[in-house]
Image: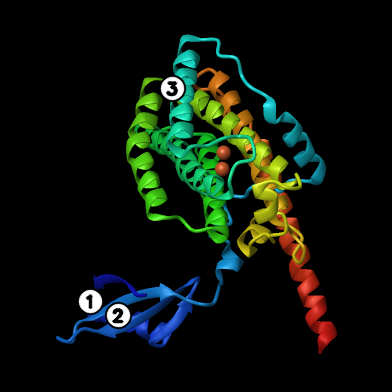
Amino acid sequence: MYRRLNRLLCPQTVSVISNSINKTTKLSYCKVAVSKLEDGRKFISTKRSDKYSEVDIADHSWRQMNHIWTEDEIKDRIKSAGQTYTPKTFSDHVAHKLMKTLYHSFNFITGYKADNPTTKSIEWRLIVLESFAGVPGFVGAAFRHFYSLRALERDHGMIFTLLEEAENERMHLLTCMKMFKASTVTRTLVFTAQFTMTPIAMLLYLIKPQMLNRFVGFLEETATQTYANIIKHVETEGTHLNKDWGSLKAPQIAINYWNLPKHDASWLLCLKHILADEAHHRDVNHALASLPTGSDNPFIGEHIQNFDKAAVRRTEQILKDTIHSNYEK
Ligand SMILES: [Fe+2]
Ligand SMILES: [Fe+2]
């Protein structure tokens, strides 16, 4: 489907572009075409090209690099699933009460039961949970971005941490969307959750940024517990989740995003990686909530390491591919 820019250009600009791209060419992941309107004016239109498949890009920019979990790290995060933070300050208590109220209302509306949940109840729970979990990080990042602009000051990496979390949550959602479909009711709930919860997240950040981080810390505690419960049931013979999800393969988008084994990655392994991400969000947000305003971002080192490791993985892959293609010749 064409997404038209409809940006009318002066004839010289169009001429330069059309000469350089020879009417239609692939630029990055967009196909650009110069077309003519009926009255002779020219415009540029773009559409998704097949140069980079969904698998290649995994809907993921290269700047925001997620952590690739090792087996031992995942085991540690699964063990930590019951870990909770005890509210200390007044704002902690407000965030905790708000989270608990929302959590119990959500369980009531969705009819969720932790013991042997049905697959359907988990499917729509995950879609709604992940669609909302991607909101607070983006809200926090937006506030910090605007603050940096108006204060004429650097942010020192906190924006990045929050954006990385938001993207990670969106990847959880997109991974889920490869495994099951959202019904009209689920879509309505997703829509409602976004429109009601985004202003609440903004309000919390406006009152006290640490209060939103604490709220997300509590939210992530429940997300980690939910995934731990799902994993336990997928691994337990005779449960609904074991029957429906026990032998499923991980979708390709997840294999690329978490660097899972290419041929035999299971959906269960994918769920374990998501749990590790959620436990990490829990720890990051509780840590940020405990930091005094204006503190340095303690997670910068992690981002640098994640980027360096990704660069090494990418270089190794290019070398392997080159050796492989030379060997085939
Ligand atoms: Fe998530
Ligand atoms: Fe999360």
Mark 2, secondary structure of its residue = helix
**Which residue position is annotated with label 1?**
10
Q: Hey, what amino acid is under mark 2?
A: Val
**Would residue 16 appear left or right of 264 to someone viewing this image?**
left
Taking the spot 62% from the left edge, 50% from the top edge, the residue there is 65
Residue 248 location (% of width, % of height): 69, 60
Q: Quarter of the image holding residue 71? A: top right
Cα–Cα span, label 2 and label 3: 55 Å
Which is more foreground, mark 3 or mark 1? 3
Say which of marks 2 and 3 sits in front: 3
Across and down, in percent, residue 212 comes to 46, 26
Q: Amino acid at mark 1?
A: Cys
Residue occupying the point 75% across, 46% down: 235
Identify the residue position indicated by label 2 in the image.
14
Query: Which residue is pictured at 20% across the width and 84% down the height?
Result: 37
Q: Which residue is nearer to you in this view: 94 or 318?
A: 94
Indicate the quadrant of ligand 1 in the picture: top right
Q: Which residue has dot 3 on it? A: 98
Horizontal and vertical percent position of residue 150: 34, 33
Q: Decide: is 326 above or below 239.
A: below
Q: Residue furthest right?
A: 327
Is residue 174 visible from the viewing direction of this image?
yes
Mark 3, secondary structure of its residue: helix
Q: In which quadrant will I find the C terminus?
A: bottom right
Callout 2–callout 1 Cβ contact below 8 Å: yes
For this orientation, the residue located farthest to the front is: 238
